[in-house]
Amino acid sequence: MSANGIPEDVLMNTELIKDLQTVAKDAALLHGVLMRTKEHPNSSEVVTYAPFTLFPSPVPKAVFLQALAVQTHFNVLVDKISQDSGFLEEALASTIAVDEFTRRLFNIYKQIQKEGRSQSIVLGLNRSDYMLDENKDGNSSLKQIEINTIAASFGGLSSRMPDVHRHILRVAGRLEESQRVLDNNPAAGLAMGLAKAWELYGSERAVVMFLVEDSQRNIFDHRYVEDELWKRNITTIRRRFENVSMTTSLDQEKRLFVDGQEVAVVYFRNGYMPQNYTSEQSWEARLLIERSLAVKCPDISTHLAGTKKVQQELARHGVLERFFPEQPQVVEQIRATFTGLYTLDMGPEGDQTVALALSKPEQFVLKPQREGGGNNLYGSEMYQVLEVVKESPERTAYILMDKIQPKPLHNYLLRRDSPLELSSCVSELGVFGAYVRQGKDMVMNECVGHLLRTKSTEHADGGVAAGVAVLDNPLLF
Ligand code: ADP
Ligand code: MG
């Protein structure tokens, strides 16, 4: 690792590393960095550790603080976008013409626009992700990968990671580094947002409902947030998104009921991929929930505000100013985290983007409107796809983005049944935001913690759930 992390002589000390990996895996189990197995994704009889790095990764302090400082502005930005129907409609017009999934989400949005919202409380739990782009002079600058406004994960498990690395470093004799591992508790912060929304909803008996996937390997990540709610005597229930249509209903006041229980807050930990909507019933359930009086996290407009097309439109000249007309410093702070983002809309600007990407495919990433990892296109694959779609409106399903190039560092990635080997890695820093608005009043707007994920440079794409990235902690320098 070095570059102000763990010195190379420690990394190369194979005897020490072998011992440490055993200590490390036990520490992960001991501190609850857990995952169900791929063989038994719905059973807790036998579980394993969630993959993680042996050592924390160095992150420059200034850049880390910059990411935390801009988070409350991103919260406000997302919230403002969600209330700006003119902007959302214009930004997504070309996308929904060709992308069916986004179109269906958008149709729900339009339907609600027509009928009027029934709930004025908005709860946003998001995570803004960044990589550090290495400049020619060797410094690195914070560049946003994306903002996740639905089902942003790993707030739970990342709350348990500091103690794991502290312990490993102590055993390795690196006491000074051990003391520098930062506290982190997004689980508590996310729960604070959920609890606030629940409280404003104003019914003691009503519950917080987590809508989850069929295969629940990452359940412990949710459990930490649930646990924080139970500690506040807030009842939480889990329901599979796929089944929820069968058991939900609205009463005359549009209160949402599931299996006879009133729901104050619906927390989507699912519903962000086309595959999550297994039938028409899933779409009907999404609409029913959206119509209800329950607080939705996210509501449909906040979900749409997190699309990659919106991200690209935000980078256009003058667009941030539209949302922060009197706040040039806020605009400046947000814009500083943007890298090059380019439209593929039909017309001369989009044609230019195509030419740019085809001329230097290694310098860009082609992104469709998808979440969950593994959907982006790079290098020759991107080239091939662009060659096929470049003349047709199909290209507007994508956006183009500069490829962020972080400086690789060395670390060991600990993953069940994987050999112990030194890997060349890059990290992605996520920052969690939580906000609650009631009508016009922001009653909560906070940055509630961070997530560092690290992956081998062999992989261009993919997160922890996809089996590519692993959990980590930043070691500031
Ligand atoms: P998803 O919604 O699928 O998570 P992301 O935009 O986060 O989509 O991209 C997935 C992964 O691809 C990221 O975690 C990151 O590793 C990589 N990636 C995305 N955009 C870029 C970029 N501009 N430069 C370098 N890597 C990127
Ligand atoms: Mg992502």
Image (spheres, rainbow, N blue to C red):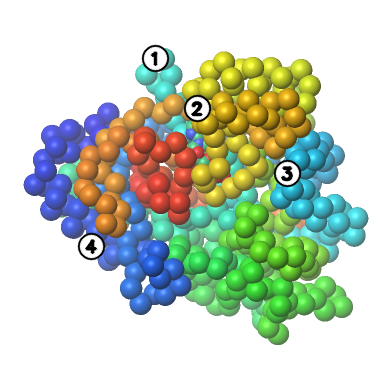
Question: Given contact means CB atoms under 8 Å apart, are the residues at marks 3 and 2 in contact?
Answer: no
x, y (%) of residue 84? 80, 42
Residue type of the residue flagged with mark 1: Asp
Q: CA distance from mark 3 to mark 2?
A: 23 Å
328 on left or right of 29: right
Q: Is residue 3 visible?
A: yes
Q: Could you say whether the residue bearing mark 4 is in a helix, strand or loop?
A: helix
Residue identifier under label 2:
379
Q: Which residue is more in the foreground, 103 or 56?
A: 103
Mark seen at residue 137? 1
Q: Residue furthest bottom?
A: 260
Question: Which is closer to the viewer, label 3 or label 1?
Answer: 3
Q: CA distance from mark 3 to mark 1?
A: 41 Å
The tag earlier along the polypeptide, 4 or 3, is: 4
Residue identifier under label 3:
99
Q: Could you say whether the residue bearing mark 1 is in a helix, strand or loop?
A: loop
Q: Residue at x 80, y 56 (%)?
A: 108
Q: CA distance from mark 4 to mark 3?
A: 45 Å
Q: Residue at x 68, y 83 (%)?
A: 259
Q: CA distance from mark 2 to mark 1?
A: 25 Å
Q: Could you say whether the residue bearing mark 2 is in a helix, strand or loop?
A: helix
Question: Which is closer to the viewer, label 4 or label 1?
Answer: 4
Residue identifier under label 4:
26
Local packing at callout 1 (Cα closer than 10 Å; few below 14, some 14-19, many 20+) is few
